[in-house]
Amino acid sequence: MGVIIPNPTVETEDGATSVTNVKKIEVSDGTLTDDGSRIVSIDTTGEGMTSFTLAGSTGANQTITDGNTLTIEGVGTTRIKTVGEATDTLTIDMAQTAVTPGSYTVSSITVDAYGRLTAASSGSGSGDVSKVGTPVDDQIGVWTGDGTIEGTSAFTFVGGNSALINANYCSVDLNSTLSNAKVYFRDNDNYEGEIHYNFGNGMSFKTLDGTERMRIDLWGNLMLGTTSRPGSARGVFVIEDCGVGNTPGTPSTGGALYVEAGALKYIGSSGTVTTLGAA
């Protein structure tokens, strides 16, 4: 843009610098202003930025140019909201839900897909107390036919770590889907032995080291110190051989029946050993 002024004088605004008889003034990207009193101002500060690109985490980039208005919108009515609060301030905040702030007990809550509570209410007590019967000290609670929990005198604690099964006809049912059922005995969590039922072997009794000491098998055979059933025997009493030199000592009362080197023997309280059957 060219401006022609006859015999002009050009000076800075503070008058510190001036040039007379200026023939021509050339200005690029400026604004020419006449105040009406033959004083002309030229603004050469430039036109500024004309566009910029707006990008989100998803969606296409948007170009914002001069004259466009950039609008930052919230999502829905209960998630994110935006508020223009001043000429240069935009506040982004979470929208409030209908849930009243506070603490809830035995709560019933509703959570939307964004993890926000949209409804909450307190319940009463600690559950359906109408289904809890009258408690009695040391009794075990059991379910009744109508779903109520009631204490039963058939099974009570009697002190320490002991429990009492109190009924005319008592039973403990060990129901295993693997054809195995065990009762363990422990002393301060240390293994002391077990009673083990196996569908193929029958009932066995194990001691501290886990060794089987007695078995009653499925054919009614009683085996002491051995697990070997003699052939297809049924209803027999099998005793493990104690071995030569391992005979029992003299019992103080009664007597001891044992097998030594295949022979069945008996020793009484007088120390007399009687062979009942040869090897």
Image (cartoon, rainbow, N blue to C red):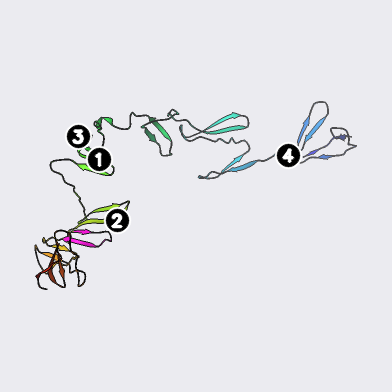
Q: What stretch is highlighted in magenta?
A: 204-215
- Nearer to us: label 4 or label 2: 2
Estimate the x, y position of residue 51 in percent, counting from the top left. Answer: 63, 41
What type is the residue that disc 1 sits on?
A: Phe
Determine the CA span between mark 3 and mark 2: 40 Å
Q: Residue 56 location, x and y as percent?
A: 54, 43
Which sits earlier in the primary sequence, circle 1 or circle 4?
A: 4
Q: What residue type is labelled 3?
A: Asp
- Answer with mark 1 or mark 3, whichever residue precedes in sequence: 3
Q: Determine whether the residue tagged by mark 1 lies in a helix, strand or loop.
A: strand
Q: Could you tell me how far apart the alpha carbons at marks 1 and 3 are, in whole angstroms?
A: 25 Å
Element type where label 4 sits in the image: loop
Q: Mark 4 points at which residue?
A: 46
Q: Name the residue under label 3.
A: 146
Query: Could you give the CA–CA distance between mark 3 and mark 4, rounded to whole angstroms?
Result: 87 Å
Question: Counting other residues with Cα less than 10 Å from the Cα at mark 1, is it few (<14), some (14-19), or many (20 or more)?
Answer: some
In three-dimensional space, the C-alpha distance between marks 4 and 2, rounded to whole angstroms, equals 91 Å
Vertical order, 273 against 18 (above or below): below
